[in-house]
Amino acid sequence: MWNALHYSLSGLREALRCEDAFRQEALLAAVLIPTSFVLSVGGIGRALMIASVLLVLIVELVNSAIEAAVDRISLDRHHLSKRAKDIGSAAVLLALFNVVLVWSCVLQAR
């Protein structure tokens, strides 16, 4: 378990060090998560708001891993490499749309 924790923390450090998008989304999380505690929403609404933000970070980590693996295989342009990277990027975009949707629904319901 200790090794798994070490690898996970190393992955987070690498993402923060090397991935601009992850840093931007981590900054967004650092603003939105505390904001969810200031807003007068119920516990379930707050949990949904926080979970939607954390989902963006999770999907971005997976997207970054896909991009790194594709780049490790080859830096040559290939339609399958582009497809993999574009699909990963689309997943992040959907996660960001999800934040907007969840936060809008929770804030409208209060």
Image (spheres, rainbow, N blue to C red):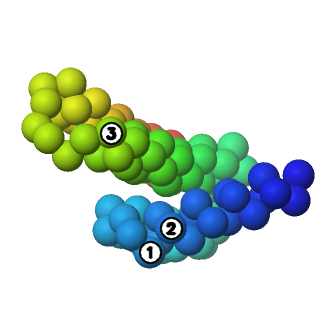
Viewer-nearest residue: 104 or 24: 24
Secondary structure of the residue carrying tag 3 is: helix
Where disc 1 sits, the SS reads helix
Sort mark 3 into few (<14), some (14-19) or many (20+) by Cα contacts within 10 Å: few
Q: Amino acid at mark 3?
A: Ile
Please provide percent x and percent y for residue 107: 47, 51
Q: Nearer the viewer, residue 46 or 59?
A: 59
The residue indicated by pointer 3 is 73
Report x, y in % for residue 70: 32, 39
Residue at position x 28%, y 30% from top?
84
Res 41 → quadrant: bottom right
Q: Earlier in the sequence, mark 2 or mark 3?
A: 2
Q: Which residue is mark 2?
A: 14
- Any part of residue 92 in sight: no
Q: Check whether the beta carbons of the residues at disc 1 and disc 2 lie within 8 A of each other.
A: yes
Near mark 1 (Cα within 10 A), the count class, few <14, some 14-19 or many ≥20, is few
Image coordinates of residue 7 in percent, x first then y, are 69, 58
**SS class of the residue under badge 2?**
helix
For discs 2 and 3, the disc positioned in front in the rendered view: 3
Q: Is residue 51 left or right of residue 42?
A: left
Q: Amino acid at mark 1?
A: Arg
Structural distance between the alpha carbons of marks 1 and 3: 22 Å
Whether residue 37 is situated above or below residue 85 in the rendered picture: below
Residue at 29 percent across and 46 percent down: it is: 71
Query: Mark 1 sits on what residue?
Result: 17
**Gap between marks 1 and 2 measured at Cα:** 5 Å
Residue drawn at (88%, 52%), measured in percent from left and top? 1
Spot occupied by residue 87 in the image (x, y as percentages of width and height): 27, 30
